[in-house]
């Protein structure tokens, strides 16, 4: 079959708050071919992402993403790989292109799975999908007391793994951060996995990070996430060699396979975190997962939005039994919940199961999305080159 | 003074061809403060770049670039550094943001130089600017005979350094490529610097590259440029260790300081090529130049467009006497020529001199640009959030 149409939808909550919650808006992508449709989601700023799909060509290596997608064949996995290669060859000077490609690639796998009547993970070569242990992501409280209360609540809600991040952490003294780490551990109890996310606050400042290692070790942190900017390889590798040893996790900012490969090769990570909505989709994410297995690094998804994005983000490592942890959007905004009619709810063991239905196994809820549509128009030289399509 | 306005202009030739010529369109940025104005240029796809400036906020780390710029103080270099840090903190999940920031940062240095009545290179800490030897960039011919004719013409036109790239190279057999390399050297004569640019065609395929090393060595290639995708660190470092040794050059695709630092640390390069219109402007480019000096790697600009971009691209290494080679746009489209009233013509020794006038030392030619304006409108929820401003 041939790709007949690719439609981008910009969705948003009525009000977007200045908080670290990426589920307040969304870019959905619908691809149609052979009487079927596939859906994907970009974890990206909607307007630049749409602009990268429709913009006029600047030169041979700076073409709009649509140039490499529309009218292409889609019959087998190799066709999706080919489309990704074309996008890179034709758009490598268009920075936003990888974020745009991400939602398309995900939708293509969904569509191909529906056509071939297989879940995506099988098309990727896995025989079986293993359930994952979800971790709940939380912001640190403003005070250690608040962090303790939040941790206590999380521990009580049945999550075996909880990540605290952002908020005041990394911005004050070592003692202040240590108080938050201890409060989190005390609230959770000793058995739960506790992860700490710095949200890149230290940039490339290794000393700020090493100063916190003792406290992180004392609370038995399962990982320390994004102490530095994505790709700050030298800082990561210095910290990885620091004492005491605390496992490092990073990678969500990677927007291509080669960047993630560089993180695997040089950053000294124990966990590579990939957002399929940013790295260019499921295709490059699966390559990263394969590399991670070879290098003895654990793969973890990065997902903060809908269950469509969650299903997409689990496929690349669905078949890796030893990589059991997954990020699970615990308190997404209503928009993210309304994107699909079905949900990946936790099973009786509190684990997340990868859908067995064809494609990504998620049904997009057209009706409920209409109220979130952000009507958008882009005109160039008087011609309307983008207008919100009909859902 | 405070930044009063930041205006983006999308300019284009009447027709954009599907060729490797990045001078066919342009994104100009004008910043006004204190009765002065500064100009910069993004080497980027215009529409997504403008969208990244004006888009609605998605969350706290995915804000439009304008959020971190408008109304900020601009009195000394530290203010420009601060704006860059703000953009990274507020927009690190907005992929296109670095390309957008690039033109703004350049305009800010231009504006500050005008206010302080100093050329930008002095504000960067250099006492003196050293002239550079320009190299002419050319596409390979379709046949070795054509390549020979082009090389002969370049050699005759007085350039002491010529780079051949793109076209058929890297896509056929080793013997075909070798014939092109020899034709280029024969046409140029033995004295000229000859550089070869693969334009990332080999992706991460080290074997394709090592197969060509002998021929590159035989023609005494000054450097081999971008055999692989930007950030394909492992491929670069393997090739750097290959025999015979051919110096590697890369980096033009870096859109942040940390990416360029990773290339310096791990890719085994002899030359780091930075486009100030992509990396986030002059500020991060200067950090790269400082690092390169410490690591014994030569800095080279990447510039394919206007003399405004050329001046901006030379400032970060203007004071490094030993780094003598510069890229010089030899046959830009008329648009790129029309951007400035003055030009950085070659001096009597055939060298490029960094302007000594305040700021970037280039005057934007408003009148001549009107005919290239691409009228653009972006509407979100019925509100016009971008409209081409008055020049």
Image (cartoon, coloured by chain):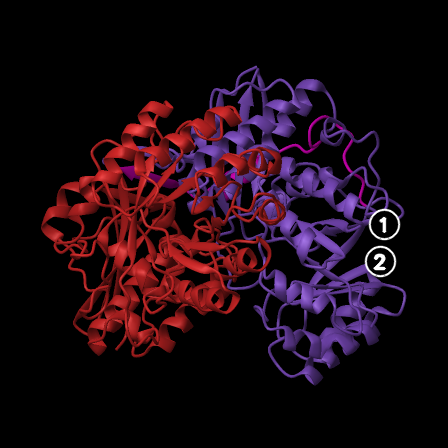
Chain colours: A purple, B red
Crowding near pointer 2: few (<14 within 10 Å), some, many (20+)?
few
Q: Are marks 2 and 1 in contact (CB under 8 Å)?
A: yes
Please indicate, yes or no, whether residue A55 appears anywhere in the rendered image. Answer: yes
Task: Give the CA separation, mark 2 to mark 1.
Answer: 7 Å
Count neighbours of disc 1 (C-alpha within 10 A) and say few if under 14, some if 14 to 19, many if 20 or more: some
Q: Which residue is mark 2?
A: A158
Q: Is residue A155 left or right of residue A30?
A: right
Tell me where the magenta segment starts and ends, as one range.
A352-380
Residue A147 lies in quadrant: bottom right
Q: Residue at x 56, y 58 (%)?
A: B262
Front residue of this view, candidates A226 and B69: A226
Residue B31 in picture, x, y percent from top left? 25, 63
Image coords of residue A77 (percent x, y): 65, 24
| Place of residue A63 in the rendered image (x, y in percent of width and height, measured from the top left) | 39, 34
Residue B91 belongs to the span the image colors magenta: no
Give me the chain letter of mark 2.
A
Numbered mark located on residue A350 in the image: 1
On whether residue A365 falls in the magenta region, the answer is yes
Residue drawn at (17%, 57%) of the image: B347
């Amino acid at each position: 079959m041939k790709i007949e149409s690719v439609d981008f939808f910009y969705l948003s909550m009525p009000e977007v708050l200045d908080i670290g919650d990426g589920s307040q808006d969304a870019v959905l992508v619908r691809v149609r071919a052979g009487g079927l449709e596939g859906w994907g989601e970009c974890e990206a700023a909607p307007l630049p992402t749409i602009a990268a799909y429709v913009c006029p060509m600047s030169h041979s290596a700076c073409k709009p993403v649509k140039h490499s997608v529309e009218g292409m064949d889609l019959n087998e996995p190799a066709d999706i790989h080919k489309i990704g290669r074309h996008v890179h060859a034709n758009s490598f000077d268009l920075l936003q292109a990888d974020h745009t490609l991400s939602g398309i690639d995900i939708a293509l796998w969904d569509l191909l799975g529906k056509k071939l009547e297989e879940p995506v993970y099988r098309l990727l070569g896995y025989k079986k999908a293993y359930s994952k242990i979800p971790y709940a992501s939380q912001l640190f409280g403003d005070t250690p007391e608040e962090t303790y209360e939040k941790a206590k609540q999380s521990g009580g809600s049945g999550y075996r793994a909880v990540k605290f991040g952002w908020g005041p952490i990394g911005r004050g003294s070592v003692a202040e951060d240590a108080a938050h780490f201890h409060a989190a551990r005390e609230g959770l109890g000793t058995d739960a996995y506790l992860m700490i996310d710095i949200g890149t606050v230290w940039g490339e400042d290794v000393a700020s990070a090493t100063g916190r290692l003792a406290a992180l070790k004392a609370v038995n942190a399962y990982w320390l996430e994004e102490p530095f900017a994505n790709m700050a390889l030298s800082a990561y590798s210095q910290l990885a060699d620091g004492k005491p040893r605390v496992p490092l996790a990073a990678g969500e900012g990677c927007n291509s396979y080669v960047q993630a490969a560089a993180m695997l090769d040089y950053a000294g990570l124990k966990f590579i975190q990939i957002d399929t909505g940013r790295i260019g989709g499921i295709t490059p994410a699966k390559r990263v997962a394969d590399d991670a297995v070879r290098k003895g690094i654990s793969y973890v998804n990065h997902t903060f939005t809908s269950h469509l994005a969650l299903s997409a983000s689990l496929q690349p490592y669905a078949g890796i039994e030893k990589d059991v942890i997954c990020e699970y959007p615990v308190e997404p905004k209503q928009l993210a919940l309304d994107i699909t009619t079905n949900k990946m709810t936790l099973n009786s063991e509190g684990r997340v199961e990868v859908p067995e239905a064809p494609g990504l196994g998620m049904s997009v809820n057209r009706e409920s999305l209409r109220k979130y549509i952000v009507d958008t128009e882009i005109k160039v030289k008087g011609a309307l080159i983008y207008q919100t399509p009909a859902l």
